[in-house]
Image (spheres, rainbow, N blue to C red):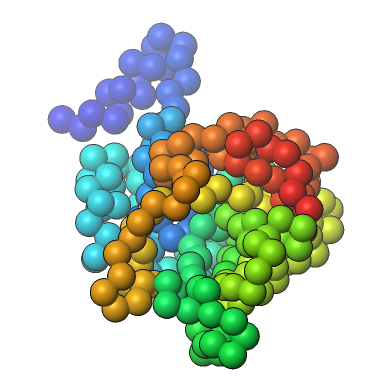
Amino acid sequence: MRILPVVLALAAALGVTPVTAADKTTVLITGANRGIGLEFVRQLSARDWKVIATARDPADATELQALAKADPDITIEKLDVTDRPGVDALAAKYKDQPIDLLINNAGKTPRYMSAFKQSSGVDYDQALQSYEINALGPLKVMSAFLPNVANSQLKKMVVISSKAGSFPESPKMPMMYEYRASKAALNMVVYTMSFETAKKGVTLVALSPGTVSTEPAEGELGYGQKMQAMPGSVTPVDSVTSMLKVIDGLTPAQNGQFLDFKDGRVIQF
């Protein structure tokens, strides 16, 4: 016996319009396999949203796979934000899917061994990779999925940035050249694209998630180094809970702004 037709018939008899997967609020999250991205999946899935969660290597995303197994409204897609043809292919796959909220979370964090080195210690290969992942990747994703967001109800795009890319609020010392430059570039991407999103009724903001104590990706720590929580750091749960409050309250007047996760205050680029 097929259950869905029976449910639909019963709903019709009672005069109730059932909510189907196609009707649900939809979010697309990049870098959803760990840390902040994974927590966004957890919390938005708990809201009964339809979640499109992307990861560079879904086969290794065991926690994400477990969430998807428990919730049929979570779909995992393979995506490397630096693979521009891959981004286009995924956008083509979902061309008819409205996306209410696009969360650009995928990013490259500082390598521990080079984070505190001065200009003479800059790793230019890492700098180029940081720029590709942290700035150009989100730009490509937003450009490819802008029609989906414009065709939705919420019409919101969020980029996870960092105060490290803010001129007035970044550390006043020579450190994290690769990371800070890439996040400053990301902030400019948001500012520039906001003139485009405004014409389509889409609200685009950058969000600082705070200093979040997450496990690093492979290669982000130097040999023999262990992850230690920074003073004043917050958990992914607390960061995402606060960011979602800010996201829920976004208005078109905030388009193009850089906001703090705690209270939505404006951070200067």
Across and down, in percent, residue 263 comes to 65, 34
Tally of numbered tags: 0
Residue at (84% x, 53% y) in the render: 199
Quadrant, the C terminus = bottom right
Across and down, in percent, residue 141 comes to 58, 66
> Does residue 169 show up?
yes
Across and down, in percent, residue 112 comes to 42, 72
Rendering quarter of residue 19: top left
> Does residue 182 show up?
no
Q: Is residue 190 placed above or below 150 in the rendered structure?
A: below
Rendering quarter of residue 184: bottom right
- In the rendered structure, the answer to whether residue 101 lies left or right of residue 151 reads left
Across and down, in percent, residue 31 comes to 43, 60
Closest to the observer, 7 or 91:
91
Closest to the observer, 167 or 83:
167
Q: Is residue 3 placed above or below 266 in the rendered structure?
A: above
Quadrant, the N terminus = top left
Closest to the observer, 263 or 55:
263
Q: Is residue 225 placed above or below 228 in the rendered structure?
A: below
